[in-house]
Image: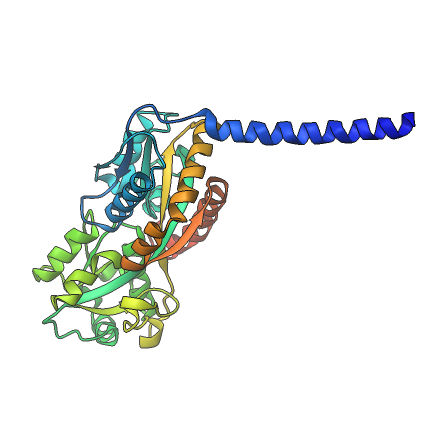
Amino acid sequence: MRRRLGRAGVMWGVCAALISIYAAHVRAADAWQPHRPIEIVVPSAPGGGLDLVARTLQSVIQQEKLSSKPVTVMNRPGGGGTVSIAYINSHEGDGHYVSVQALPLITNRITGLSTVGIDDVTPLAVLVTEQVVFSAPGDSPIKSGADLIQMLKKDPSSVTMGVSSSPGGQSHDAAALVVKSVGQDPKKMKVVFFDSGGEAMTALMGGHVTVSATPAGVVLGPSQAGRVRLIAISGDKREDGALAMVPTWKEQGANVAFTTWRVLVGPKNMTPAEIAWWDNVLQKATASPLWAVAVKRNLWTADYQSSTQTRAFLHGERDRLSPLLTDLGLAK
């Protein structure tokens, strides 16, 4: 009987320990709450792909009442994202400041544009992935990706490519891969860098660049109005919905498969309690029907990953992109 009670006591002890651990985890998620407005910082000008993600996240958090404090969006373009990271890190360890980032978070360090990289932020979530869409003006003689390939094969310097990224960023990488895939040196292509996809679209419609490579979310309006023609997407297969009629580069003779992503990061040295709060909020936000509608409308691909998963993902992307940028002559 004593032995039986002893075993029962051990079992109760184990159960109590598990309950205690669970309760501690719950308390950790509840231990931090924002006590002033939250700032989502965008490293590009208003109207671009990153801005769209940030403002969508702001709207969903507020409409779903996931934060007790207001959420604001602040645009701090410059330096391929480094200006925005410097800003949130001026509030080191403070979960009220977060930033939507893209490939330059990794590529700037590889290309030598910045000493700031993924080790200088707190990864919080992968939010979405997105196609890079190549467009030409509506009245351009370039009717397809195949037409552009012929121009690039003949003389890559005859093409002025507007990209919505810094050197080595998502749009530049995608454009360089197209040039490289047709046997040309991507450094021979004339590239104009813009702080946002919206700015690149404006330049394209104004005839200031031959073609553009931008996030999918900024091309729909100009395309539907007949101002631009969508000639190719950079992904491995065709999309559904509004991009269903746009062929991949592979279909048109260029062996290119590349998509970009949008992540949310905080300043370095955030506390576990702050990270837990954001994990909870972002999981609920990206599971919201409001988020699903925005994903479809903006031609994103839903791909939420938690803070732990995002940290591993970003390190994997750094390993993948380092040799790619070396091959393109961009690594320092």
Toward which corner of the image does residue 203 lie, by quadrant? bottom left
- Residue closest to the eye, 80 or 2: 2
- Looking at the image, which residue sits at the far front? 1
In-image side of 194 versus 310 (left or right): left
Asked whether residue 184 appears in the rendered view, the answer is no
Question: Image quarter for residue 239?
Answer: bottom left
Question: Splitting the image into 4 quarters, where does residue 10 fall?
Answer: top right
Instruction: Measuring from the top left, give residue 23's x and y in whole percent.
Output: 58, 29
Residue appearing at x 29%, y 47% in the figure: 53
Image: 238 above or below 260: below
Residue at the spot 21% in from the left edge and 39% down from the top edge = 78
Q: Where is residue 41 in the image (x, y as percent from the top left)?
A: 27, 36
What residue is shown at x 33% (from left), y 37% (from top)? 65
Is 144 drawn above or below residue 198 in the view shown? below
Number of labels in the image equals 0
Q: Name the colour scheme.
A: rainbow
Which residue is pictured at 8% across the width and 62% down the height? 207
Position of the C terminus, as image quadrant, is top left
Q: Can residue 19 be seen in this view?
A: yes
Relative side of 169 to 303, left or right: left
Residue 31: percent from the left, percent from the top?
A: 47, 25
Question: Relative to residue 93, is residue 79 drawn left or right?
Answer: left
| Vertical arrangement, residue 146 with respect to residue 90, above or below | below
Query: Can you give x and y, in whole percent of width and height, for residue 249 in the image?
Result: 32, 70
